[in-house]
Amino acid sequence: MKSLVNEKVSHNKFGTGKIVEETALKIWVQFSEAEQPKIFAFPIAFEKFLILEDAVLQEECKKLAKEKRKELDEAEARRVAGIKRIVDEERRERLAAARLKRKKKPKGMLSRP
């Protein structure tokens, strides 16, 4: 994909602007009404926030954004599954400890409700 620097974009809140800098993960857009450039996540910003004047580049960015969103969603699903696994393991350990504790009680003792 070619550089986006100097490409014109529009934003619902900030109006029209020009991309003044880019990295693999961020773009800086200078809007006419803003003193400082606004920073956006690249390419995710093209999902909802930014629209390039160049329709071909816009479609490329939307495609990249879709791929990035899929990666992010998969990473989040792995993170949630890992947390769930840890919680389930801790729950099983607590249940096992509780069962062991019940087995160790002398037979003559009454259990509390």
Image: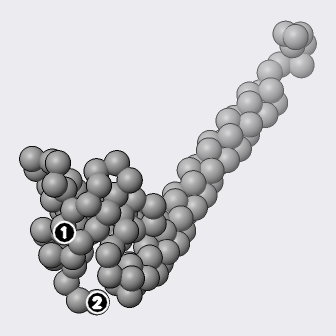
The mark that comes first in sequence, 2 or 1, is 2
Q: Is residue 110 left or right of residue 25?
A: right
Evaluate if marks 2 and 1 touch, with contact meaning CB atoms under 8 Å apart: no
View extreme (left): residue: 35
Specify whether 57 is left or right of 95: left
| Residue at horizontal 52 percent and vertical 72 percent from the top | 70
- Identify which residue is drawn at 17% across, 48% down: 33
Q: Position of residue 28 (x, y in %)?
A: 18, 62
Q: Residue at x 45, y 66 (%)?
A: 47
Tell me if residue 81 comes above or below residue 4 in the rendering.
above
Residue 2, x across and y down, in percent? 23, 89
**Residue 11 vs residue 111, the one in the foreground:** 11
Colour basis: one colour
Q: Is residue 43 left or right of residue 22?
A: right
> Is residue 35 rendered to the left or right of residue 40?
left
Q: Amino acid at mark 2?
A: Met
Above or below for 55 versus 83: below
In the figure, residue 77 lies in which quadrant? bottom right
Q: Is residue 35 visible?
A: yes
- Which residue corresponds to mark 2? 1
- Residue bearing the label numbered 1: 19
Alpha carbon separation for disc pair 2 and 1:
15 Å
Identify which residue, 59 or 89, lies in the foreground. 59
Residue type indicated by callout 1:
Ile
Viewer can see residue 109: no
